[in-house]
Amino acid sequence: MRAIGGLWRWRHNPLRRATDLAEAWVALAALLLVLLAAPLIGVLVGGVAQGALQQAVREQREARHLVTATVVRKLAGSPLGPDPETASARDVRSRVEADWTGPDGTEQHGKVMASLKSPHPGDHFTLWTDAQGRTAARPLDTATATTHAVLAGFGAAALCAGFVEGGRRLAVRLMVRRRYARWDQAWDRAGPDWGRTGTGS
């Protein structure tokens, strides 16, 4: 920012070096890219991610079905913690052996996770399955998909800003190294005669 402010002050300054002006222009270009390009990239990436995730939501809702299962018996083992994607953190899941009927009418039997704290034989609970009645994960919901898309957009914008800042720092570093190399060359030329009478020093 200091270099950008220097653009106006250094326009007609007789002590201005070409590298000073170049550093200021690089800083200004980087700032404009961070303010304009990074948000644009974030919006584009977020939009693409939102479209893909919402398509996945629709496909999962078509392919997965909620059925009612009946507990046959509780299996050994302590209840598991709540599903992080469930609405309530108070939900506890237990391992049970259960029977259920798939969407295609087939009778199914197996070991599944039940959203029951203390399951007993005959208790009913809901279960997500595919079209053939095999157990499946709960489909992605719209709000979660949108959250992931927003995070993807923010991540892309931050990554873009990081690349721009990295490029600016690299450019300034190269300019500073070039400036030091020129100073060394000038010193090598002036060094042997420094302080001698009649050399103009």
Image (tube, rainbow, N blue to C red):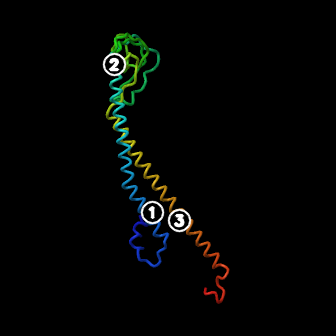
Q: CA distance from mark 3 to mark 1?
A: 11 Å
Asked which secondary structure carries label 2, the reply is strand
Q: Which residue is mark 1?
A: 26
Mark 2 and 3 residues: CB-CB less than 8 Å, in contact?
A: no
* The disc label shown at residue 175, or none: 3
Tag 2: amino acid: Thr
Q: Position of residue 125 (x, y in %)?
A: 34, 17
Whole-angstrom CA distance, mark 2 to mark 3, is: 66 Å
- Image location (x, y in percent) of residue 118: 38, 17
Quarter placement of the N terminus? bottom left
Q: Is residue 24 above or below residue 155?
A: below
Q: Earlier in the sequence, mark 2 or mark 1?
A: 1
The first of marks 2 and 3 along the sequence is 2
- Secondary structure, mark 1, is helix
In the rendered structure, which disc, 3 or 1, sits on the residue that comes first in sequence?
A: 1
Q: Nearer the viewer, residue 128 or 33?
A: 33
Quadrant placement of the C terminus: bottom right
- The answer to whether residue 112 is above or below residue 184 is above
Residue 136 relative to residue 166: left or right: left
Farthest residue, direction right: 192
Task: Tell me where residue 193 sits by quadrant.
Answer: bottom right
- Residue shown at the point (34%, 32%) measured from the top left: 55
The x and y percentages for residue 52 are 37, 35
Q: Residue 155, which numbered label?
A: none
Q: Amino acid at mark 3?
A: Met
Q: Which residue is mark 2?
A: 126
Crowding around mark 3 (Cα neighbors within 10 Å: few <14, some 14 to 19, many 20+) is some
- Estimate the x, y position of residue 79 in percent, counting from the top left: 42, 21
Circle 3/circle 1 CB separation < 8 Å: yes
Q: Nearer the viewer, mark 2 or mark 3?
A: 3
